Image (cartoon, rainbow, N blue to C red):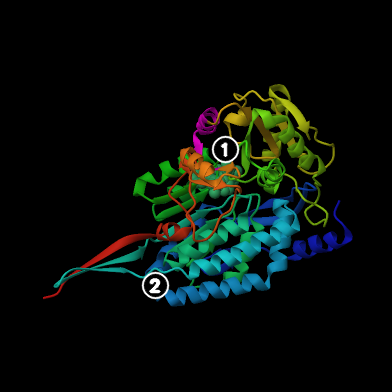
Amino acid sequence: MPTEQSKKIIAQIRRKSFLQLINGTLTAGATTIPVIDPATEEVLLHAPVADKAQANQAIESANQAFSLWRTLPISDRVSLLLQLLDRIEAHRDLIAQIITLEVGKPLAAAYADVDLALMWGREVTQMSLEPTRLEKAPDTIVEIHHAPLGVVLAIIPWNFPFFQTLYKLVPALMCGNTLIIKPAPTTPLNALLLAELAHDLFLAGVLNILGDAGDLGPHLSQHPDIHKISFTGSTSVGRHVMASGASNLKRIVLELGGNDAALVLDDANLEMAAKSIFDWAFMNSGQVCINIKRIYVPTKHYDAFCTLFAAHAQRAVLGHGLNEQTEFGPLQNKRQFETIKQLLEQAKKDGTIVAGGTITAGKGYFVPLTVVRDIDENSPLITEETFGPIRAIMPYHSIDDAIQRINNTPYGLGNSVWSSDLERARTIAQQLESGTVWINTHFALAPDVPFGGHKQSGLGVEFGIEGLLAFTAPKVIHINIP
Ligand code: NAP
Ligand code: MG
């Protein structure tokens, strides 16, 4: 239940008006959509959503703005982005409160999202887009510049919406592109607040932020005047996005689902591994692409590990994100809640539940942190991505067998190896099929380290210089000196 202080925060946010940003103007929606607090199921307020005409207007303005925006010196673009980041910092409390209310996550985690977005944005603006110069012969110079692509469409999911918006926005605009942001229908408010903070900073059309009732995605992704799509979401929608780019050969980066495994070796410190794996398995109530979703433990340590791991889950405090003692919030939306409820029933059939397992009656999309052991590995809990707080632990006899089972998935986002023997862990890391393999940690991301999925977890990368350059195309100027 929200406290008195929380009620004040909610009332203050309800009084705010949230508008889209289209062609430099704060704009009401063609219609509105209710935004729900997932911890209470109450309507927070009604947010504006665009119809196709408004979406087209945003795309047209972004195309018009591109011709001027791309010619500005990069230092001017960076200066505007740094001003935006300063405004965000000045509104840190409000943004964090909005994230907590619409996403459901604890306030401390929402502040961490805002701070991460600020750190990330500022670091990206330090990266260099200087052309490379090759002196091929005394009379020949080749310059490789990084040209912007045009109008970028950023499709944002609901799990870290503010951070995800910023880590697409800063590199896209810095490189000289213009941008359309489409937040998830269930978490639009943080993006609409950004619209308010940014509306008078950029040339009209450079940044557009639309609301969506759940039907705008295909219209935008098929639009012939969009030149690049940066999509974060599920693998199944990722396939549609890729197909819709074919008509005008849009550049596409896809960050999709994951089914990350943690492989505990027999020489790992079990207590430390159980605690860290618990943290990264259940972070954001299990709604992260790079949560640890499958845990492999040597047979001889299996019982001990299951007990240690389940104890952490049993102690977890669930509640409204504005309550100080809350460690884990609800699932973000009803659809996700219904999916996870079904998986909970499946878990009871396919394995033995040693923590959680029962949803208490009452309002809010709360699912207790649930740990399953002795599970049939053909269960959808293992073969598919479980995007919620249910995690399974499996025993293994030999490392080769564990590696084979871990790799037996169409996903390839991340994995981790837990061991006190770093050389051994590194050798095993080479054999795991994923874009990232962590050793004795999981989840660690940085603005200067590329992140992307192998197999069907994605296409291309974000972050690092590789991620920045993915918002550009190489442009060669070949000079013959007469
Ligand atoms: P989702 O179901 O894939 O939806 C993402 C968005 O795609 C929606 O807002 C939807 O907009 C839009 N969309 C649907 N069809 C489209 C189309 N044909 N063209 C363009 N857009 C379209 O994902 P979600 O439920 O928001 O997020 C959960 C998933 O995201 C999980 O699988 C998770 O692993 C993944 N994820 C991955 C990462 C990563 O970095 N790899 C990070 C976070 C989450 P409409 O409203 O218009 O339908
Ligand atoms: Mg839809």
Where disc 1 sits, the SS reads: loop
- Quarter of the image for residue 177 reads bottom left
Dot label at residue 68: 2
Q: Residue at x 39, y 55 (%)?
A: 227
Q: Quadrant of the C terminus?
A: bottom left
* Residue 407 part of the magenta segment: yes
Dot label at residue 156: none
The relative height of residue 289 versus residue 125 in the rendered view (above or below) is: above
The x and y percentages for residue 86 are 61, 74
Badge 2, how many Cα within 10 Å: few under 14, some, many 20+? Answer: few
In the rendered structure, which amino acid carries the disc numbered 1? Asn
Residue 413 in sight: no
In depth, the one of 111 and 222 nearer the eye is: 111
The relative height of residue 192 versus residue 429 in the rendered view (above or below) is: below
Q: Residue furthest right?
A: 4
Name the quarter showing ligand 1. top right
User: Mark 1 or mark 2, which is nearer the start of the sequence?
Assistant: 2
The x and y percentages for residue 401 are 53, 27
The x and y percentages for residue 337 are 71, 38
- Determine which residue is flagged by label 1: 259
Residue 417 in sight: yes
Q: Residue at x 41, y 63 (%)?
A: 63
Q: Residue at x 74, y 47 (%)?
A: 38
Badge 1, how many Cα within 10 Å: few under 14, some, many 20+? Answer: many
In front of the other: label 2 or label 1?
Answer: 1
- C-alpha separation, residue under disc 2 versus residue under disc 1: 43 Å
In depth, the one of 135 and 362 nearer the eye is: 135
The relative height of residue 300 versus residue 4 in the rendered view (above or below) is: above
